Image: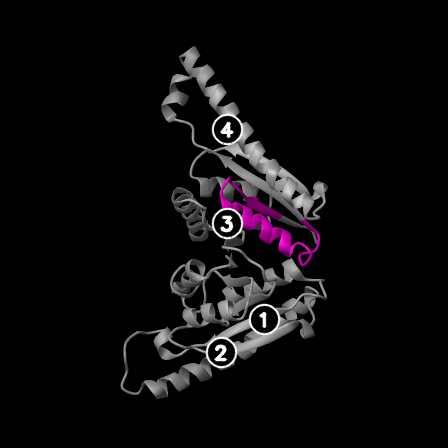
């Protein structure tokens, strides 16, 4: 099945990291096509207003918009040339640019919906302080507002193709598994880790109880029943997508300090290049609340995918 991947780019170094990540994962994602998308800078509202009445203002506006368009096309073509040089066929790459209409994140989401994109890929930080602030705010806004299309946010330089899916037995985690099947199904070389951190009482409630150990046992047993049932559904979803059981590794870890810190520790020490999570877990506060929020902001040299 064809996948349409929207890569949001600007002239920042982190946009290059996002494109390099797409190149790295290209052989693992079958039948993928790319749209390189750049939102042009904001044009002054005063200039837009005056252009309706003043000829000189209109000429200045046209000149500015033409300059923005040419700079945008230059950025897009440079990234296209990089992808082609690394072996991605030119016919699989489309270029798209538009003037900023409203908030950049909203422009991106509207474009992704109009073009029926299967995911949005963006670099999380720029190379300068200003670019870092701007790119960070866009990726954050996207993470906060995605409703239909998954967001893949690349933070740093990704060198590993190892993929982990964080699961907790929730519907959100099942949607994450379904997205994994769609993206990587049909590739016999793919290996995927289903990562489950066994929670303790403190992961649900920070209040200390006198008999916390006994309550922890109840939490663990309840979690075990839930996740065992989840694995049955997850394996069925992945099998239907063309991912065999031998391609899966199930990894269960005890919660150390917290679920979120245990996940981050495993991803960074386990040399994973991609972490995929559902937008919300068992607790609606998980995203963008505690676990997924923490992973999204903390993990370095990895792509974090949020599935709504």
* Precedes in sequence: disc 2 or disc 4: 4
Q: Report the side of 222 relative to 273 (left or right).
A: left
* Precedes in sequence: disc 4 or disc 1: 4
- Secondary structure beneath dot 2 equals strand
Q: Which mark is residue 253?
A: 2
Residue at the spot x=53%, y=62% of the render? 276
* Precedes in sequence: disc 1 or disc 3: 3
- For label 3, the residue is 123
Q: Which residue range is magenta in the image?
A: 5-32
- Secondary structure beneath dot 1 equals strand
Residue at the spot x=27%, y=86% of the render? 210
Contact (CB < 8 A) between labels 1 and 3?
no
Quarter of the figure with the N terminus = bottom right
Residue at the spot x=61%, y=51% of the render? 22
Contact (CB < 8 A) between labels 3 and 2?
no
- Secondary structure beneath dot 3 equals strand
Task: Give the Cα distance between marks 1 and 2.
Answer: 12 Å
Image spot of residue 231 (x, y percent): 58, 75
- For label 4, the residue is 68
Q: Is residue 10 magenta?
A: yes
């Amino acid at each position: 099945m064809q996948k349409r991947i929207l890569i949001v780019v600007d002239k920042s170094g982190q946009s290059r990291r996002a494109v390099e990540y797409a190149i790295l994962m290209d052989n693992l994602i079958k039948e993928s096509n790319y749209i390189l998308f750049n939102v042009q800078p904001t044009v002054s509202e005063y200039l837009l207003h005056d252009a309706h009445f003043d000829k000189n203002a209109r000429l200045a506006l046209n000149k500015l918009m033409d300059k923005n368009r040419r700079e945008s096309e230059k950025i897009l073509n440079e990234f296209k040339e990089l992808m082609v040089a690394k072996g991605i066929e030119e016919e699989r790459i489309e270029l798209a640019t538009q003037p900023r209409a409203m908030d950049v994140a909203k422009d991106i989401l509207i474009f992704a919906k109009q073009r029926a994109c299967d995911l949005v890929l963006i670099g999380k930080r720029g190379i300068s302080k200003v670019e870092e602030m701007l790119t960070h705010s866009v990726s954050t806004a996207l993470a906060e507002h995605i409703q239909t299309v998954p967001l893949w946010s690349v933070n740093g330089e990704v060198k590993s193709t190892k993929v982990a899916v964080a699961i907790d037995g929730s519907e959100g985690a099942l949607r994450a598994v379904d997205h994994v099947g769609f993206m990587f199904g049909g590739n016999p070389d793919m290996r995927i880790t289903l990562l489950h951190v066994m929670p303790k009482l403190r992961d649900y409630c920070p209040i200390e109880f006198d008999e916390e150990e006994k309550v922890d046992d109840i939490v663990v047993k309840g979690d075990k029943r839930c996740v065992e049932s989840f694995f049955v559904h997850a394996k069925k979803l992945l099998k239907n997508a063309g991912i065999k059981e031998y391609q899966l590794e199930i990894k269960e870890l005890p919660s150390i300090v917290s679920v979120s810190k245990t996940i981050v520790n495993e991803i960074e020490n386990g040399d994973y290049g991609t972490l995929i999570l559902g937008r919300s877990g068992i607790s609606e506060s998980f995203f963008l609340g505690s676990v997924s929020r923490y992973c999204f902001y903390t993990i370095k040299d990895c792509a974090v995918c949020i599935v709504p």
